[in-house]
Image (cartoon, grey):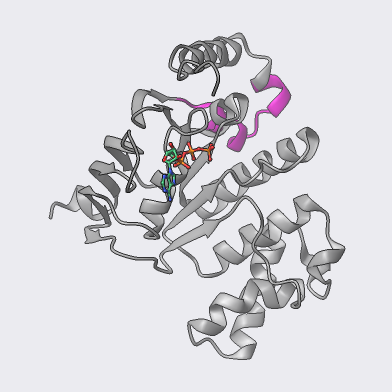
Amino acid sequence: MTAAHAAQLIVDRVSVRYPGTAHAALHDVSLTIQPESLVVALGPSGCGKTTLLNLVAGFIKPTSGHITLDGQPVDGPGAERGVVFQDDALLPWLNVLDNVAFGLQLRGLDRREREVRARQVLQQVDLQGYAGRRVWELSGGMRQRVGLARALAADPRVLLMDEPFGALDAFIREQMQELLLRIWRETGKRILLITHDIEEAVFLATDLVLMSPGPGRIVERLSLDFGQRYAAGESARSIKSDPQFIATREHVLARVFAHRQPHTSGA
Ligand SMILES: Nc1ncnc2c1ncn2[C@@H]1O[C@H](COP(=O)(O)OP(=O)(O)OP(=O)(O)O)[C@@H](O)[C@H]1O
């Protein structure tokens, strides 16, 4: 193993075919997530985004190909890969603090250590005043922040985010994107995020991977710096009204439409 491979998440020529399906859900997909990069996989429904994330999370295994994190094979779920789901997947009978601390209990930290760590990450997601609240008392955006805090609590090497803002309204969604960029800058975590929202993808990604269905595959890769500009202090409004941002968004939009599966009549 080279030193360069030691600090990367590598998806190497991975294919997945679910039993009884006509097309591979993923065909020959390769992807490298470098330190401090924020990789966004974007594509229409059915292009294999969730399959890709579930592979990296270790929830499913590839039919062929390999995945390694920092030189170690990924062959099941692990605490070094923190997952944030679209529906927050919180435990409704626990309060906010205990939801965030839950995974730490499984890892053997004592009560005091768990609480200190949970309060620290709640502060990172701007929820310091909400530790004692029940999760059903929170708005959707707040619940997603608890989900993010829970994933961060274990100090994972990679954050995996499956349409994390998909259920939120447009205003809260933008706030969450900005919060994510702030946390990314503060923690330097590698992030793999999947979305079907083009503006979100262009705004957040350092590496944008465009996917297409039938079979699910990567059709284009772009290196972008809009998220880095936000993290460096430029306002989201100024970035999103920059002609370069608009041109990139339009390019991506055209590519996504060009690769949509044709609509089957009668389907
Ligand atoms: N467990 C499964 N069994 C059989 N086929 C599956 C299974 N999971 C996904 N698929 C199929 O694999 C393909 C890719 O699905 P996947 O959910 O990864 O795509 P996606 O891009 O995340 O879609 P969406 O945006 O709708 O969630 C689709 O054709 C889907 O129907």
Q: Is residue 226 magenta?
A: yes
Can you say whether 236 is above or below 258 in the image? below
Q: Quadrant of ligand 1?
A: top left
Q: Position of residue 206 (x, y in %)?
A: 46, 33
Q: Position of residue 265 (x, y in %)?
A: 53, 15
Q: Indicate left or right for 202 with 51 as reference.
A: right
The residue positioned 78% from the left and 52% from the top of the image is: 140
Relative depth, front residue between 212 and 225: 212
Relative depth, front residue between 182 and 80: 80
The residue positioned 47% from the left and 18% from the top of the image is: 260
Please give the range of residues in magenta: 224-239
The residue positioned 49% from the left and 27% from the top of the image is: 225
Q: Indicate left or right for 190 with 89 as reference.
A: left
Total marks shown come to 0
Q: Position of residue 80 (x, y in %)?
A: 41, 65
Give the quadrant of residue 119.
bottom right
The residue positioned 39% from the left and 44% from the top of the image is: 52
Q: Indicate left or right for 104 with 138 as reference.
A: left
Residue reaching furthest to the right: 137
Q: Main secondary structure of the magenta part?
A: helix
